[in-house]
Amino acid sequence: MADLNVFSGLLDYPMYVVTASAGGERAGCLVGFASQCSIDPPRFAVWLSTANRTYRVARRADHLAVHLLRRDQGALARLFGGETGDEIDKFQHAAWHPRHGDTPVLRDACAWFVGRVSGRIDGGDHVGFLLDPVEESPPVPGRPPLVMFDDVKGISPGHPA
């Protein structure tokens, strides 16, 4: 079986911060595996590592929020990508507010949406969450440069290996 290193090594894709809330717990992480997957109805899929605390909270959540960060928000990307919620409360270090379904939304995100979890897909060491958007951020002027994979590939994951 091929491991996709040659193919995926050529990719540079947007990174997202995904947040969740369930049972009084909040969690969030940096995610690279995500994409719009349907136009009509509009749907988006995010893939969360099963080793990640965010996955453990998200599997009990009805809604998830997906955020885009501007390239100048590297500190926020490092917070959600390089720290684990098992050790720190990331939301004490980032401005946020509860939105639909009490889902935490990062105030400084370039753009965001909250989606209702309408399905889950086992993908191996990641589980896909199929989201039906229910709320989104106001329009963003222009097209700001976003945090991409190449910007964060040096961040060591905060969750255990």
Image (tube, rainbow, N blue to C red):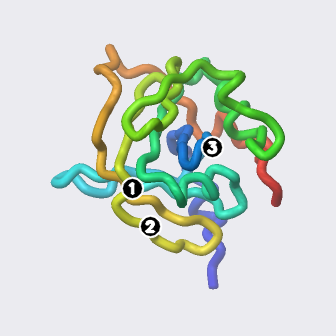
**Residue type highlighted by circle 2:** Arg
Using the image, tell me which numbered label, if any, was put on residue 120: 2
Residue 58 in the figure: left or right of residue 119: right
Q: Give whichever of 120, 74 is nearer the camera.
A: 120
* Residue depicted at x 38% and y 59%: 130
Contact between marks 1 and 2 (CB within 8 A): the answer is yes
Horizontal and vertical percent for residue 86? 79, 46
Task: Determine whether 19 is above or below 132 in the image.
Answer: above
Residue 160 in the figure: left or right of residue 108: right
* Residue depicted at x 56% and y 38%: 17
Quadrant into which the C terminus falls: bottom right
* Residue depicted at x 69% and y 55%: 52
User: For numbered disc 1, what is the local secondary structure?
Assistant: strand
Horizontal and vertical percent for residue 71? 57, 23
**Residue type highlighted by circle 1:** Val
Instruction: Work out how far the residue at label 3 is from the one at label 2, CA to CA, in angstroms.
Output: 20 Å
Instruction: Please name the residue that numbered disc 1 is placed on.
Output: 117
* Residue depicted at x 41% and y 55%: 45
Instruction: Work out how far the residue at label 1 is from the one at label 2, CA to CA, in angstroms.
Output: 8 Å
Instruction: Please name the residue that numbered disc 3 is placed on.
Output: 25
